Amino acid sequence: MKLSNQLSTLLIISALFVSCKSDELSDGTGKLALSVTDAPIDASNVKAVYVTFTGLEYQNSGGSWETATDFTSPQVVNILDLQNGKTSLLGNYTLKAGNYTGLRFKLDAPTKGSNNPSNPGCYVELSTGEKMPLFVPSGSQSGYKANGNFSVPINGVVEVTADFDLRKSIVVTGSGSTYILNPTIKIAVNNQSGTISGLVSNLTSDKKYVIYAYEKDKYSPSESNEPTGENARFANAISSTKLSASGAYTLAFLAAGSYDLIVVSETSAGLVTIEKQVSAIVVQSQKTTSLNIAL
């Protein structure tokens, strides 16, 4: 009987210990290593797009938005310089361990309709060297949400890349005199993403080429029509990149799955032609799918 009581006491102590450890783990923290990347812009006269990040907010499991207190100073990034898998690290942030359903970026940007600021935090640099303010319709108050989910491990690090698609995000109005930013941002968890890369051959020197990635069977030929209002061509593309002079391309930070690729040419007069479609390209996490395309 005495031994039985001792065993019962040990079982109770063990249960309490496990319970305490569980509570401790549920209150643990981890790190978010956050980088940004981009797809190219359609406007040929734009050579740089500078964005000033002033803060970061996150949403834990669909709950309320909280501020990342360790985002301590503004960061200026030339988003247009981050193509073909190139990234810029914004920082490492301490978050509670758990699942997250969104990030929101605060930007130092002028509000659409306001007077042109002399020193805007967000601006476009043209090939002529002229700098134009980059207006943000909702200003810097609400911030811009990045869509996607990620999990922060206890005492670990999750590496996440926010993909700013400037091709769909920047709208030029007022006969090319006003630049507006409507960010299209998606979140990619690095170790859950893959890459497609290769060479496109039989190019002609008098055209420029872009390759677009679509989720399988999501491309519609009507997307190649002339854009209207604030809509971009190929609006449903997941990612895109310009071909180099040699025809090389890299489509990075793609979620595992099956994709269709659309190779497009454009003349100096703006005539857009669908050169080739390649279907059902499989992407696996942490792997590069090599694909050469002959036009």
Image: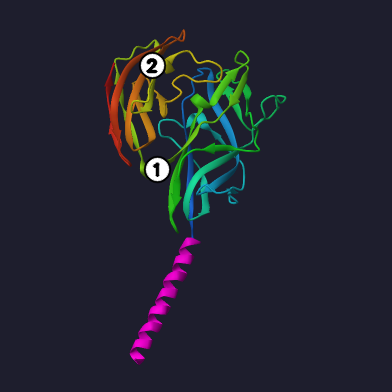
Report helix, strand or loop for mark 1. helix
Q: Is residue 98 above or below residue 105?
A: below
- Taking the magenta stretch, the answer to whether it contains residue 191 is no
Q: Residue 258: x percent and y percent?
A: 31, 32
Q: Is residue 65 left or right of residue 220?
A: right
Q: Residue 17: x percent and y percent?
A: 43, 74
Residue shown at the point (61%, 48%) measured from the top left:
72
Report helix, strand or loop for mark 2. helix
Q: Residue 267: x percent and y percent?
A: 42, 10
Q: Amino acid at mark 2?
A: Pro
Span shown in magenta: 1-27
- Residue found at the very far bottom of the displayed protein: 2
Q: Circle 1: is it few (<14), some (14-19), or many (20+) Cα within 10 Å?
A: some
State if disc 1 and disc 2 touch (CB < 8 Å).
no
Tally the marks. Answer: 2
Q: Which residue is mark 1?
A: 190
Residue shown at the point (58%, 51%) measured from the top left:
70
Residue shown at the point (27%, 25%) measured from the top left:
292
Q: Is residue 238 above or below residue 209?
A: below
The answer to whether residue 125 shows anywhere in this view is yes
Q: Which residue is mark 2?
A: 221
Q: Nearer the viewer, residue 124 or 7?
A: 7
Q: Nearer the viewer, residue 251 or 62?
A: 62
Measured Cα–Cα span from mark 2 to mark 1: 31 Å
